[in-house]
Image: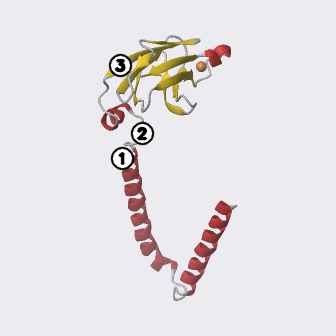
Amino acid sequence: MVVFGVLAALGVIWTAVWVWVLGHSGGRAAYEELVPKVDVIRRRLFYLSAGSLTLLLLVSFYWLPYFPMRALTIGKPQLVVQVIASQWYWKLSTSEVPAKTPIEFVVTSKDVNHGLAVYSPDGKLLTQVQAMPGYTNHLIYAFERPGTYMIRCLEYCGMPHYVMVTPLTVK
Ligand SMILES: [Cu+2]
């Protein structure tokens, strides 16, 4: 209801602004006279939009979980955990990792696509990466607090998909 109210108010303001602009535009102009002016505005809007979106894209890389950015934002991995997904279990090279340490998960699958998802002790999804046959995906993550985290599958991979759960102890 609040969102509707805000949007309705913005709509009224927008309409009022346009009514005011039309009322103060000084009458009708010939179409041929307007075309070059509109062309300039359109061109400027295009460059402004393209520039803003490109800038937004570049800045957003900082928050995206892409491997090279994670290495920059989280830090160089201090420990590598090999993860192999299979119907219907996870095989980890270790089930214990240190807290506050950048860890690199090297993830692949033996059969079909799986989704490696790391859940906090209170059940919140923290990070995830695909486990794909024939590919190796890398995920860097640093656990804030010690505890028992859960690795679950986020990609439906067959009837017993839900049993793909394994604990990961963070010390
Ligand atoms: Cu699954």
| Residue drawn at 51 percent across, 23 percent down | 148
Residue 158, given in percent of the width and then of the height, sits at: 65, 16
Q: Quadrant of the N terminus?
A: bottom right
**Circle 1 is placed at which residue position?**
58
Residue 140, given in percent of the width and then of the height, sits at: 38, 28
The disc label shown at residue 64, or none: 2
Quadrant of picture, ligand 1: top right
Instruction: Work out how far the residue at label 2 is from the one at label 3, CA to CA, in angstroms.
Output: 21 Å
Q: Quadrant of residue 138?
A: top left
Category of crowding for the residue at label 1, using alpha-carbon neighbours closer than 10 angstroms: few (below 14), some (14–19), many (at least 20): few
Please state which amino acid type lies under the numbered disc 3.
Answer: Val
Residue 30, given in percent of the width and then of the height, sits at: 51, 82
Q: Quadrant of residue 144?
A: top left
Category of crowding for the residue at label 2, using alpha-carbon neighbours closer than 10 angstroms: few (below 14), some (14–19), many (at least 20): few
Instruction: Work out how far the residue at label 3 is from the one at label 1, CA to CA, in angstroms.
Output: 28 Å
The disc label shown at residue 80, or none: 3
Asked if the residue under mark 1 is in contact with the one under mark 3, i.e. CB atoms within 8 Å, the reply is no
**Residue 136 in sight from this viewpoint:** no
| Residue drawn at 41 percent across, 42 percent down | 63
Front-lying residue, 4 or 103? 103
| Residue drawn at 52 percent across, 18 percent down | 167
Of tags 2 and 3, the one toward the viewer is 3
Between disc 1 and disc 2, whose residue precedes? 1
